[in-house]
Amino acid sequence: MIRSREVIPPSLEYALVANRVLAALASNDLASREAKDAVDDGLQLLNSMIAGQQLTALRTVSADSYQALAYGEGVRALEIHYRGRGSEPIVLLRELVDVASSLKENRHVEEEAIREFKIFFQSMRDIALASSEGPLEKVS
């Protein structure tokens, strides 16, 4: 079985999720099934980042080590907007998880929290799209 991580670079996968979340936020219809699914994908990505932080802290190598890559990308996205604010990345990620959970469950979320959520996913998308990964080498 081919897994998406083997075909699609993780950074591109994160960009696709981020773009989907941003499209859901732009639709202004977060009650729709598509928007809820998109926010749920964003929530899963955020939870992967938190799990990746734990794997990184423990220096654990396992089948789930790709989550550490998600954490690294998340930290890069947070550094763009939160540089110099002194908050730990894991604290900020947990705040984003709370926002995603609230959006998914149609609970009230402050406009500022939605703006921060949106900026995070824009940064995730932009980092992946600006990636300078080289093309695959051809062997003749």
Image: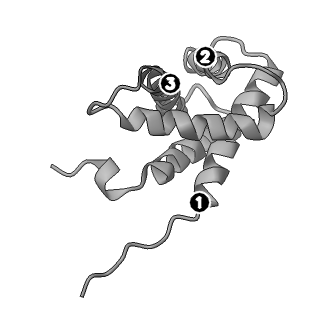
Q: Disc 2 designates what residue?
A: 94
Residue 53 - label: 3
Between the C-alphas of marks 1 and 3, the distance is 22 Å
What is the crowding at mark 2: few (fewer than 14 residues within 10 Å), some, or many (at least 20)?
some
Query: Visible in this render: residue 27?
Result: no
Residue 40: x and y in percent read 48, 27
Residue 100 - label: none
Above or below 31: residue 128: below
Between the C-alphas of marks 2 and 3, the distance is 11 Å
Query: Visible in this render: residue 93?
Result: yes
Of the two numbered discs 2 and 1 in the rendering, the one whose residue sits closer to the viewer: 1
Quick one: SS at disc 2?
helix
Between the C-alphas of marks 2 and 1, the distance is 26 Å
73 or 60, nearer to the observer: 60
Q: Disc 1 designates what residue?
A: 131
Residue visible at 67% across and 40% down?
77
What is the crowding at mark 3: few (fewer than 14 residues within 10 Å), some, or many (at least 20)?
many
Answer with mark 2 or mark 3, whichever residue precedes in sequence. Answer: 3
Residue 135: x and y in percent read 44, 73
Q: Amino acid at mark 2?
A: Arg
Residue 140: x and y in percent read 24, 88
Q: Amino acid at mark 1?
A: Ser
Of the two numbered discs 1 and 3 in the rendering, the one whose residue sits closer to the viewer: 3
